[in-house]
Image (spheres, rainbow, N blue to C red):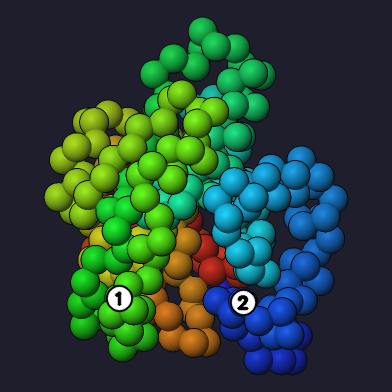
Amino acid sequence: MTFDSTATGQDSNPESGDPKSSDAKLPDRYGAMCLTQDQSFMEIFQAGLQSTEMNNHPWLRPRFFHMVQMLKLTSGLNGATVDAGCFRGLSSYLICKYLNLEKTAIGESSYLGREHFMIDSYEGLSEPVSQDGQESKQRWGEKAFTDTSVERVLQTMKDFPDIKIVQGWIPDVLTEVPEQQYRFVHIDVDLYQPTLDCLRYFYPRLVHGGIIVIDDFGPWRNKKWPGCQQAVRLFSKQTSIPFAALDTGNAVFFKR
């Protein structure tokens, strides 16, 4: 599925925080099931928002709902999980909450060695390249995503003993990630080069049945993060590995 703003006959902007925008109607577009009937997700999502002090943009819930569904498809697989570009930790909070539910279901003894790695500079974006476009360069110049810190994220994740903070810039920081297999990887690094670097590093290390979710595939009408989509398409072309583009803006790779 690809994002189609014509579905409602209105212009739409998934990155907008304006409640008057057409994307304030996202719950209608994506159906009552994913945003209202899954009460467990709604409760965990709201708790995560409160813990991270994140704004409740209308595009966050459907995107993270899809992320959680992809994580659940890897249930029972061996391997660690990764959140690359975790910012304040909302996506990792959701991932670890659902991993705890899985751990309870399958038992502690079967869950040994399944760490969750949180990779980020915790200092904002790396410098964009030409593929990222002017909007991304402007966001970098405005020091977007700098309102976080390791200490703040550790406070959010204090109830999850299996997390490992990995601080640094991609790709150099990837050398600090253990050489092991991974079952689920969430990539939310916004820009062309770090997205491509993450795909090239983690896809070969996925277990069979493992999944990578890319958050910023888009496309977005405000032209944010065009480099991310270019990186996904290039990786797919160079490796002949297909991906699925979801109507929430996520892209997904499955290891077959």
The secondary element bearing badge 1 is classed as: helix
> Residue 168, image x and y in percent?
22, 49
Mark 1 vs 2, N-terminal side: 2
Q: Residue at x 52, y 87 (%)?
A: 221
Q: Residue at x 39, y 18 (%)?
A: 113
Q: Residue at x 51, y 40 (%)?
A: 156
Judge left or right: residue 34 versus residue 113: right
Count the numbered circles shown: 2
Q: Above or below — where is 161 with respect to 36?
A: above
Q: What residue is pinned by disc 1?
A: 140
> Residue 153, image x and y in percent?
44, 44
The local crowd at label 1, few if under 14, some if 14 to 19, many if 20 or more residues have their Cα within 10 Å, is some
Q: Above or below — where is 97 with respect to 212?
A: above
Judge left or right: residue 203 versus residue 98: left
| Residue 83 showing in the rendered view | yes
Q: Amino acid at mark 2?
A: Gly
Figure quadrant of residue 19: bottom right
Figure quadrant of residue 175: top left
Q: Above or below — where is 143 with respect to 97?
A: below
**From the image, which quarter does the N terminus lie in?**
bottom right
Q: Residue at x 32, y 63 (%)?
A: 124
> Residue 112, image x and y in percent?
44, 14
Q: Is 86 in front, or is 182? A: 86
The secondary element bearing badge 2 is classed as: loop
Q: What residue is pinned by disc 2?
A: 17
